[in-house]
Structures are given as C-alpha cells and as structure tokens.
Amino acid sequence: MHPAIYKALRCQLLSIALIFLLGQSGILPPVDVLALAALQGLSASFIALMTKSDRWWLPIHLVFMPAIVLASQLRLPANTYALIFGVVLCIYWTSFRTRVPLFLSNRATVHRFAATLDTESPRKVLDVGSGTGSFALTLARLRPDWHVTGCELAPAPYALSRWLSRRSPNVTLLRQDFWALSLHDYELVYAFLSPTPMEPLWRKARKEMPAGALFVSNSFPVPGVEPEQTIEVGDRRQT
Ligand SMILES: C[S@@+](CC[C@H](N)C(=O)[O-])C[C@H]1O[C@@H](n2cnc3c(N)ncnc32)[C@H](O)[C@@H]1O
C-alpha cells in the first residue's frame, strides 16, 4: 500500500515550489515570511483537496508551514526539536506506515469484554498492537486464569507496558510486528487498530487461528464481513 504520508509530502513540496515560482516571477508582492507560509498552507490545502486527500489532511496542510515559522520565532535551542521528534517517534514509531496510531481501550470495554467472554478457562488471548497494555493488563487482572499476550512495535508504549506488567504473572509482552507473529496459538485475538489493517488482518486470522477461535475487533469492522455478534459497551465513546 502506498503510504498516505507520501501524498501529503507531495502536496507540501508542490505548494512550496508554487509559492517560490510566484515569488521569483514577481507576481507575489513582497510579504513577510509568515504571510508567505500562510499562502503556502492555503495552496497545500487546495492541492490536497484537488488530489482527493482525506478531508482531515486539509487543516494539517493549512497550519503546517505557519506552525514551523511561528515555532522558529520562539528561538528555542535547536536540539529541542530533535528531542520532541525523538519523543514522538518513540510513541508513534511506524504509524506513518501502519496508519495505526496509539489510543487506548477504556476500562468499561475491557470489563465488558471479560464479562461477555466468561467461558471455559484457561483462555489464551492475544492483543495485536498492545500499546501501553491498557487492554492486556486490565484483562489479565480481571481474569487471572487466562493468559494474555500483547504484541507491540512502538518502543515507548512497549517499555511502559513492560514496567506496568512487572507484577502480572499471566501476561507476556512481545516487542514485535504482529504481521510476523503466528496466530495459531491463540484462542482469542483482540484488535483495536484502525480501518487500514482490518482486511489483511482478517485474512491472516482465518488462515492461522485454530478452529473455534474468536477474533474480536474493537470499533473497526472487517469490510464486507458480517460479525457473528456486536457488543455495545454503552460508554461515552460508543464502543
Ligand atoms: C489503537 S492502539 C491500541 C492499544 C491497545 N491494544 C489497547 O486496546 O489499548 C494500536 C497499537 O498498535 C500498534 N501497532 C500498529 N501496527 C502494529 C504492528 N504491525 N505490530 C505491532 N504493533 C502495532 C501501535 O503502535 C499502537 O500502539
């Protein structure tokens, strides 16, 4: 799949080239750098609109360059930016490619999950993309007779989950790509990801999970597949 980030980059670069050419040709009157950045933002949004980018990219394109100009006027030490970039990178890691950012299952969902699936034990559960462990660790506490495995790629959420799991004997946390992990050992796979991976993940689940195993997706349906059961948690998020 072609990462959407390349399309966004093309919109930015095209609009920079456009504003540069307009400036060089004398069509643009001399304006200050913030006004130039605002014009660049406007044209980047317009290009994104014309190239059928998802709507939520438009405000990002609009404010991206002005935000850079404003931030540069704060005169922060140069390594502040590297530090912020490092922190964001450790949290989101490959989200630009996987298109699955970090957000967490809430307690109501995990409680409902544990109550609904209160069947024979022991259960072997896998959380694909376990984040900070908010699902895996809560479930492991609620069901000490189950074994919960979490699999997470991003280093910061993984490290936090490892630390939080230090007193949870029925939890295993792996730092790895779930696409490289076989699902054949798990009786139950839980996914709280985004619309992007659902179709290939469903194919992987059907190929690898044992007969009778359960695949549960929080919030993101598998396109074209009717779920056997839908559970409404009744929380504010309408999970
Ligand atoms: C929406 S969060 C869900 C966190 C957790 N499962 C929960 O319910 O609270 C999705 C997580 O999946 C991780 N992720 C995305 N793609 C992944 C992959 N291919 N392998 C492992 N983790 C991945 C992201 O880094 C992110 O932390």
Image (cartoon, rainbow, N blue to C red):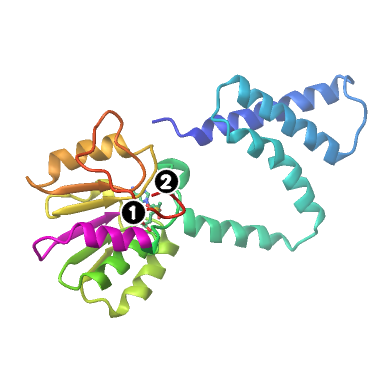
Q: Is residue 234 above or below residue 25?
A: below
Q: In which quarter of the image is residue 61?
A: top right
* In-front residue for pair 191/45: 191
Crowdedness near tag 1: few (<14), some (14–19) or many (≥20) residues, C-alpha within 10 Å: many
Residue at 15 percent of width and 71 percent of height? 145
Q: What stretch is highlighted in magenta?
A: 108-129
Relative horizontal placement of residue 70, taking residue 202 as reference (left or right): right
Q: Count all numbered tags in the image, as a single digit.
A: 2
Horizontal and vertical percent position of residue 3: 46, 34
Q: Which amino acid type is shown beneath numbered disc 2?
A: Val
Residue at 42 percent of width and 48 percent of height? 238
Cβ of mark 2 under 8 Å from ligand 1: the answer is: yes
Q: Give the structural element (helix, strand or loop) at label 2.
A: loop
Between the residue at mark 1 and the residue at mark 2, the CA separation in whole angstroms equals 9 Å
Q: Which amino acid type is shown beneath numbered disc 1?
A: Gly
Residue denoted by label 2? 100
Cβ of mark 1 under 8 Å from ligand 1: the answer is: yes
* In-front residue for pair 167/3: 167
Relative horizontal placement of residue 8, taking residue 181 as reference (left or right): right
| CB under 8 Å between discs 1 and 2 | yes
Q: Is residue 55 above or below residue 50?
A: below
Mark seen at residue 129: 1
Residue at 30 percent of width and 51 percent of height? 177
Horizontal and vertical percent position of residue 169: 22, 76
Q: In which quarter of the image is residue 194?
A: top left
Horizontal and vertical percent position of residue 148: 22, 64
Q: In this view, does 120 lie above or below 11?
A: below
User: Is residue 239 found inside the magenta-colored segment of the image?
Assistant: no
